[in-house]
Image: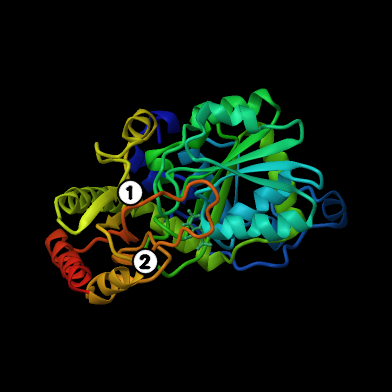
Amino acid sequence: MAKNDSEMGINTLLAHSGNNPHDYFGFVNPPVVHASTVLYPNAATMAARSQKYTYGTRGTPTTDALAHAIDALEGSAGTIVVPSGLAAVTVPLLAFLSAGDHVLIVDSVYHPTRNFADTMLKRLGVEVEYYDPHAGAGIAALIKSSTRVVFTESPASNTFEVQDIPAIAKAAHAAGAIIMMDNTWATPLYFRPLDHGVDISIHAATKYPAGHSDVLLGTVSANKACWKQLCETFYTMGCCAGPDDVYQVLRGLRTMGVRLDHHQRSALAIAGWLEGQPGVARVLHPALPSHPDHALWKRDFCGSSGIFSIVLKGGGQKQQHAFLDALRIFGLGYSWGGYESLAVPVFLGDRVVAKGPYDGPLIRLQIGLEDVEDLKADLARGLAAADGS
Ligand SMILES: Cc1ncc(COP(=O)(O)O)c(C=O)c1O
């Protein structure tokens, strides 16, 4: 294509990034390379490992196609592809933390990230501390001489607070720490972490990039300064992803722009409607003007995806379960980002700072690609059941 990547529209990038069809006889999609052994033409090449592909764990044309496509979207120096979104969190933390280091993790983080920090990182001698998602520049007060990593996730898992990423990046860098961000909610279409000072951008590609609830995959993208260390850890750990899953995510990327646009519009229509429903105390969606962090979201993000939470007006677990059990279209399931709508009860018992108070039980909704009026009718059934319980 004639234009530079940086000049192209996002849907053009999604349609054409990653591979050159003419490298494979003109076939539009790259081959799915199933590989462990790679042959060398002679002993000298083998001794020097001086050819592009050397071993199945260290990359194939299939993994390269996805990594290059993600680099084009993220503006990153390099991307590793790992077998799950959770591995996309744990591998960079292991790459940059050692015994005696201090890590600051946002309190509203995805729960398995907290579990990894509280078990494995602590066992390895890393000091783990949780901070308020609204800390912003104030994070400087928590940074110690041993702080190596500040871990962010914005908007927050389940409660959707928005972090001031540029302010946190500035404070982290001033103290010689690096900043990582789990950017799964926005995808690089609606927020580009590296443009806002983040060093390492993390995605559960399981969600919107895959888009069909049938694949687990993670990507981790680094700027130039962090790429070598990230990549070496990836090779050291041998945690490469399977070629069929990698291919499915590359396939999903081609339509991610149009799918996300639909998720965004439906989620906003439903979130706005829910704000007017008598059984709802609050809607936690940062793209709604009523959200306390709306101005911050508007400053930094250029879109919103399909998940947000609602707070029921009063009640407890009984009302929460009555709501969930009355739903007929929304499924009860955790992994989001697919084409179908989902609802889950939110549990905040693991939080140390960001735990409310809220006026009632929380329910997280993923708005899928179904028709909005059908989804509203289903949610109305849930609200009526919660009210009557
Ligand atoms: C914000 C966030 N990060 C990471 C993950 C982990 O992704 P995976 O399910 O692929 O391990 C999830 C999964 O729900 C998530 O919500």
User: Vertically, is 100 above or below 114?
Assistant: above
Along the line of sight, the residue nearer the viewer: 31 or 157: 157
Separation of residues labelled 1 and 2 (CA atoms) = 17 Å
Amino acid carrying mark 1 in the image: Ser
Image quadrant in which the C terminus is located: bottom left
Q: Residue 329: which quarter of the image? A: bottom left
Which residue is at a point 46% across and 58% down the rendered structure image?
348
Residue 236 appears in view? yes
Question: Secondary structure under badge 1?
Answer: loop
Question: Mark 2 highlights which residue?
Answer: 344
User: Is residue 27 rendered to the left or right of residue 290?
Assistant: right
User: Vertically, is 53 above or below 338?
Assistant: above
Which residue is at a point 19% across and 49% down the rendered structure image?
275
Q: Residue 199: which quarter of the image? A: top right
Which residue is at a point 42% across and 60% down the rendered structure image?
210
Q: Position of residue 278 (x, y in %)?
A: 15, 56
Q: Residues within 10 Å of mark 1 (few under 14, many from 20)?
A: many
Along the line of sight, the residue nearer the viewer: 170 or 384: 384
